[in-house]
Image (cartoon, grey):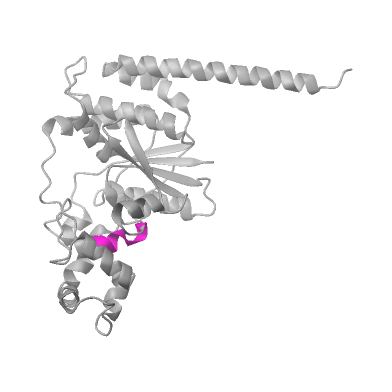
C-alpha cells in the first residue's frame, strides 16, 4: 500500500523540546528539540514504513483565525527563545533528508495537512491510498476517515504513540470525526481560547449532537423543534448562535489552502545520504549517525540475500540446454 505520512512539525517539535533536557551542538547551539524531533522522525519512518512523507509547519504570521477572532490562542504562552532558535535547525534536518516541507502564511499546519489530505485521498488519480497524520493536536482528528486517513498521536514522551481511527476518535471525544467542529462550536476550546456557548460543556455538547445530528440541523430547526432538550438549554442555544457559528469556523480545518503539492517517493536511503550525514555531524548527533548506518547495512544485507535467493530461484527454473 502506498502510504503517506504527514507530520505536524510544530506539534512534534514542541513535544521534543519539553521531553528532553538541554543539549548543545559542537558550536554551542541548543539542539535538544532538534535531536528529539530527528529521533522521532527516524522512528516513525521505521515503524510506519511510508512510501511518501512530508512535514507541515506553522508560520509566525497571523492566521485567518486570528483575524476572525482577536482572542484566538491569546492565552497560549510565548514560545521559549531556546525553542524559537531551533525551528530553522529542524527545517535544515528535514531538508537534509530530502523530505518536502509545506507551510503557508495565514494558515496553520493543520490547514496545510488538511489540504494535502484532501488532495491526495479524494483525487482518484492519486497513487496514495492511505495517510497517517502524526500530531499531538486533537483538532486534526476531524480528518480521520475509515482506513484511508488515520492519526498517530504520541502518548508518552517520544517513545510511544496510539493510532486513531474512527472508533478510537469516537471513544476519545464522544462524537464522530466529522462532528468535532460541531462539538467545539458548542463546548468551545480552552487551548485555542474560544468560548463556544456559555453554560454548555463537553457532556452537554455530546448530548445535543446525539439528538440534533449537527450544528447545521440544530439551528435549521431549533425555532420549531426542541430535539427533546430542556427549555433552558434551548434558550442558551438560541442566544449563543453567533458565537457557536464563529467557533465552528475556528474549529474547522481549512482544506483549500492555495499551496502547490508535490510529494515524491521516499526511500530510507535519504536518511544516510552525504548531506544528511553531514548535517547530523554538524549538530553532533553521532549516536543517530551510527544507528542509521547500522540499519542501512542491515537493510543492505537483507536486500542482497533476497536478490541472491531470487537469482537462485530463477536459475533453477531455467530450462537445461
The C terminus sits in image quarter: top right
The reply, left or right, for residue 13 in relation to residue 301 is: left
Q: Position of residue 158 (x, y in %)?
A: 29, 31
Is residue 188 shown to the viewer in this render?
A: yes
Q: Is residue 164 above or below residue 16?
A: below
Q: Position of residue 178 (x, y in %)?
A: 36, 60
**For the point 26% across and 49% down, which residue is it?**
108
Which of these two is toward me, 155 or 113?
155
Magenta-drawn stretch, dominant element (helix, strand or loop): helix
**For the point 27% across and 85% down, which residue is it?**
224
Whether the magenta-drawn stretch holds residue 178 is answered as: yes
Which of these two is toward me, 191 or 110?
191
Q: Is residue 200 above or below residue 258?
A: below
Q: Is residue 178 above or below residue 320?
A: below
**For the point 20% across and 67% down, which residue is it?**
244
Residue numbers of the magenta segment? 177-184
**For the point 23% across and 44% down, which residue is it?**
59
Q: Residue furthest right?
A: 321
Q: Position of residue 68 (x, y in %)?
A: 18, 61
Amino acid at each position: 500500500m502506498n502510504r503517506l505520512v504527514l507530520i505536524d512539525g510544530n506539534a512534534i517539535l514542541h513535544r521534543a523540546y519539553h521531553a528532553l533536557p538541554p543539549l548543545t551542538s559542537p558550536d554551542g547551539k541548543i539542539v535538544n528539540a532538534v535531536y528529539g524531533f530527528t529521533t522521532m522522525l527516524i522512528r516513525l519512518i521505521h515503524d510506519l514504513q511510508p512510501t511518501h512523507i512530508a512535514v507541515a509547519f506553522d508560520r509566525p504570521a497571523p492566521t485567518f483565525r486570528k483575524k476572525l477572532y482577536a482572542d484566538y490562542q491569546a492565552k497560549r504562552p510565548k514560545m521559549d527563545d531556546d525553542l524559537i532558535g531551533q525551528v530553522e535547525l529542524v527545517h535544515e534536518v528535514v531538508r537534509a533528508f530530502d523530505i518536502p516541507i509545506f507551510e503557508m502564511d495565514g494558515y496553520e499546519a493543520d490547514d496545510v495537512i488538511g489540504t494535502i489530505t484532501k488532495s491526495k485521498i479524494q483525487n482518484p488519480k492519486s497513487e496514495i491510498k492511505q495517510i497517517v497524520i502524526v500530531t499531538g493536536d486533537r483538532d486534526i482528528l476531524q480528518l480521520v476517515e475509515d482506513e484511508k486517513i488515520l492519526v498517530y498521536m504520541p502518548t508518552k514522551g517520544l517513545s510511544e504513540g496510539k493510532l486513531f481511527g474512527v472508533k478510537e476518535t469516537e471513544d476519545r471525544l464522544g462524537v464522530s470525526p466529522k462532528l468535532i467542529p460541531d462539538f467545539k462550536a458548542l463546548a468551545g476550546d480552552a487551548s485555542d481560547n474560544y468560548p463556544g456557548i456559555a453554560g454548555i460543556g463537553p457532556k452537554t455538547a455530546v448530548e445535543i449532537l446525539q439528538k440534533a445530528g449537527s450544528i447545521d440541523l440544530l439551528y435549521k430547526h431549533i425555532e420549531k423543534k426542541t430535539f427533546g432538550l430542556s427549555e433552558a438549554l434551548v434558550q442558551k442555544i438560541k442566544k449563543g448562535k453567533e458565537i457557536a457559528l464563529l467557533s465552528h469556523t475556528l474549529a474547522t480545518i481549512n482544506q483549500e489552502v492555495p499551496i502547490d503539492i508535490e510529494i515524491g517517493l521516499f526511500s530510507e536511503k535519504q536518511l544516510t545520504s552525504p548531506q544528511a550525514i553531514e548535517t547530523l555531524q554538524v549538530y553532533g548527533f553521532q549516536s543517530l549517525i551510527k544507528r542509521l548506518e547500522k540499519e542501512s547495512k542491515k537493510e543492505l544485507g537483507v536486500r542482497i540475500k533476497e536478490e541472491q535467493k531470487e537469482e537462485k530461484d530463477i536459475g533453477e527454473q531455467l530450462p537445461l540446454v
